[in-house]
Amino acid sequence: MRTYKEFQWELGKWYKKTKEENLCSPDWLHFYSDPLVGLFLNPIQEDIKNPRLFRVEVKGKGLDNYGLNYEYFRARLIEELPVPRISFVQRVRFAILCAKKVYKEKEWNKWADNWLSGKDRTKKSAAIVACTIRIALSKTKSAYFAIKSAASTVKSTMIAFYAAKSVESAVESVARSTTKSKKIDLIKIARKAMKE
C-alpha cells in the first residue's frame, strides 16, 4: 500500500498535506476519478506491477489535472476494490479512441475505424498510416500532440511495448486539447475501450 516516493497508506486513516505547491507536486494526494482511467494510465505514470484499487474519500480544496487525475490535501482510503484485467487490445482501443477526439485527419481516422472494428489490424496498414503521419508531422506544428498520439497508436499495433506509450501520448493530446466549451470524458472513453 505504498505510492509515489514510498508514501505509506493505511485503510481508514485520514492523511493531510499542508504545503500548497503546483499541480502534480508531491505535496498533493493524487487520485483518479475512475478505476479504469487509473489502470489505463498506470503504465506511463507509476508503472505499478501489481496495482491495487481503493475507493477514497476526499475533503477540502482539490485540483483537476485535465481529467487525467485529481489532487487533494486531505483523503482516506475507504475500501479495496477488485482490479479488472485490461488486455493489450483494450489498451490500444483506449489510445485510438483518445486520439480520435483530437486528430481529425481523414486517412488516419479511416485506419483507426478499421482497427477498432477489427476489419484491418495488419502491420502493413499500420506502417502505411505511420508514414503518412510522420509526413504530416513534418508539415505542421499546431497538430503536434494529436499527430504524436496517432503515430504512437500506430506503433502500438505493431509492438506490444508501445501500448503504454500510445496511451500516454493520446491522453496527453486529449487533455491539452480540452477546452472550456468541450471537456473530453476519459471515463466514457475508458469504458468504451473495455468493450471488445
Image: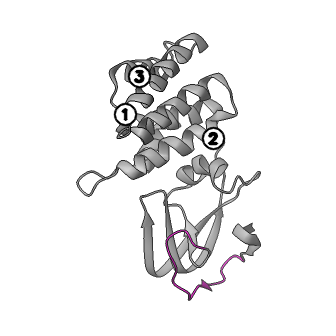
**Foreground residue, 41 or 87?**
41
**Foreground residue, 19 or 97?**
19
| Residue at left offset 49%, top offset 41% | 170
Q: Is residue 114 something one can see in this rendering?
A: yes
Check residue 164 in the rendering and tell me which mark sits there, or answer none. Answer: 2
- CA distance separating discs 3 and 2: 20 Å
Q: Which residue is mark 3?
A: 108
> Looking at the picture, which amino acid does disc 2 mark?
Ala
What segment carries the magenta color?
10-25
> Looking at the picture, which amino acid does disc 3 mark?
Trp
> Looking at the picture, which amino acid does disc 1 mark?
Thr
* Whether residue 77 is situated above or below residue 49 in the rendered picture: below
Label 1 element class: loop
Residue 63 position in % (x across, y down)? 44, 72
* Whether residue 160 is situated above or below residue 174 in the rendered picture: above
Task: Identify the mark nearer the N-term, 3 or 2.
Answer: 3
Instruction: Examine the residues drawn in magenta and state their main secondary structure.
Output: loop
Residue 182 position in % (x across, y down)? 27, 51
* Whether residue 185 is situated above or below residue 2 in the rendered picture: above
Q: Judge left or right: residue 126 versus residue 49.
A: left
* Mark 2 neighbour density, 10 Å: few (under 14) some (14–19) many (20 or more): many
* Mark 1 neighbour density, 10 Å: few (under 14) some (14–19) many (20 or more): few
The answer to if 22 sits in the magenta stretch is: yes
Label 2 element class: helix
Are dots 2 and 1 in contact, CB under 8 Å?
no
| Colouring of the image | one colour
| Residue at left offset 38%, top offset 24% | 109
Residue 68 position in % (x across, y down)? 48, 56
- CA distance separating discs 2 and 1: 25 Å
- CA distance separating discs 3 and 1: 16 Å
Check residue 140 in the rendering and tell me which mark sits there, or answer none. Answer: 1
Q: Is residue 190 something one can see in this rendering?
A: no
